[in-house]
Image (cartoon, helix red, strand yellow):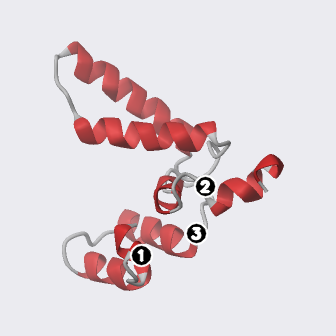
Amino acid sequence: MLTESVGLDPADVFALILGTRFPGRAYEIESVQITERSFEPGFKAKLALEDMRRATEASNQIGRTLPMLEAVREGLSKAVSAGLGEKDWSITADMTVRGGDSRASSENNPEKK
């Protein structure tokens, strides 16, 4: 997260977000996973990638460009390629912060240690 890279505590940022614009159980769960770097699957990254692939196909069929969709698809693709397809899709946040070198990827792939 950009906030972490400038010294802000992710838990404080999520508390602010959850207390204002985005209250809801899904956001609460994902924020805890990201903050604690615990990515046990709720929605596996490999399944989310498949959904993004289908959404990309649908947008292409109607001639629409969806830049955020492409960004999410790319992040999920990197996670799955790194052997993290069984982790929760929120692993992409950890990979973004670490430049693609997630702690979870090192734990799951002996060759990355």
Compared to residue 47, the image places residue 60 above or below, namely above
Circle 3 Cα neighbour tier, 10 Å, few/some/many (<14 / 14–19 / ≥20): some
Q: Residue furthest top?
A: 61
Give the residue number, with chain letter if any, for mark 2: 101
For the N terminus, which image quadrant? bottom left
Give the residue number, with chain letter if any, for mark 3: 37
Q: Secondary structure at mark 2?
A: loop
Circle 2 Cα neighbour tier, 10 Å, few/some/many (<14 / 14–19 / ≥20): some
Q: Residue at image x 35%, y 68%? A: 2
For the C terminus, which image quadrant? bottom right
Q: Residue at image x 45%, y 65%? A: 30
Mark earlier in primary sequence (3, 2): 3
Image location of residue 21, percent across then percent down: 19, 72
Q: Secondary structure at mark 3?
A: loop
Mark in the foreground, 3 or 2:
2
Which of the numbered marks, if any, corresponds to residue 4? 1
Q: Is residue 2 left or right of residue 79?
A: left
Q: Amino acid at mark 1?
A: Glu
Which of the pair 42/91 is nearer the observer? 91
Quarter of image, res 46: top right
Compared to residue 52, the image places residue 102 above or below, namely below
Q: Secondary structure at mark 1?
A: helix
Q: Amino acid at mark 3?
A: Arg
Contact flag, marks 3 and 1 (Cβ < 8 Å): no
Q: Residue at image x 27%, y 72%? A: 23
Image location of residue 31, percent across then percent down: 43, 70
Q: Amino acid at mark 2?
A: Asp
Q: Is residue 107 left or right of residue 55?
A: right
Mark earlier in primary sequence (1, 2): 1
Mark earlier in primary sequence (3, 1): 1
